[in-house]
Image (cartoon, rainbow, N blue to C red):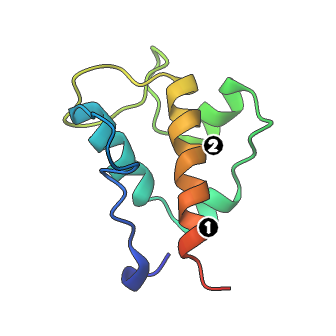
């Protein structure tokens, strides 16, 4: 996504209570490149998702700054797939 289309995704979806970890995870996803996101496959195993992302720690949680709790693969997948759906609505047709 080019700089003109940067997603302000940190607080999406609106109206849901979010902690610092929710915001940090969404900010992290919003900065992933289109090329990287295009390679994601929802059919992958958790291990494949961890390998694709490359930012998970050995304990199985995502490495994020400013977080109050660990983000494990199921939450990561859920928020990533929400992000991808939202991102598609912003892409020019």
Label at residue 14:
none
Mark 1 residue element: helix
Count residues near mark 2 (Cα–Cα under 10 Å), then give few for <14, some for 14-19, many for 20+.
some
Q: Residue 80 at what x, y percent from top left?
A: 54, 44
Q: Nearer the viewer, residue 49 or 14?
A: 14
Residues at marks 1 and 2, CA–CA distance in whole angstroms: 20 Å
Q: Tell me if residue 72 comes above or below residue 30 in the rendering.
A: above
Residue placed under numbered mark 2 in the picture: 52
Q: Residue 57 at what x, y percent from top left?
A: 43, 24
Mark in the foreground, 1 or 2: 1
Q: Residue 32 at what x, y percent from top left?
A: 47, 59
Q: Residue 65 at what x, y percent from top left?
A: 23, 37
Q: Viewed as shown, does residue 15 lie left or right of 89? A: left
Residue at (27% x, 33% y) in the render: 17
Mark 2 residue element: helix
Residue at the right extreme of this rendering: 43
On-image quarter of the C terminus: bottom right
Residue at (45% x, 14% y) in the render: 59
Residue placed under numbered mark 1 in the picture: 88
Residue at (35% x, 20% y) in the render: 70
Q: Are marks 1 and 2 in contact (CB under 8 Å)?
A: no
């Amino acid at each position: 996504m080019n700089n003109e289309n940067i997603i302000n995704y940190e607080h999406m979806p609106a109206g849901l209570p979010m902690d610092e970890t929710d915001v940090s995870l969404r900010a992290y996803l919003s900065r992933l490149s289109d090329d990287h996101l295009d390679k994601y496959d929802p059919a992958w195993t958790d291990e494949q998702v961890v390998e694709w992302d490359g930012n998970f720690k050995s304990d199985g949680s995502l490495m994020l700054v400013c977080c109050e709790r660990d983000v494990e693969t199921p939450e990561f997948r859920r928020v990533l797939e929400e992000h991808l759906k939202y991102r598609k609505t912003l892409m020019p047709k």
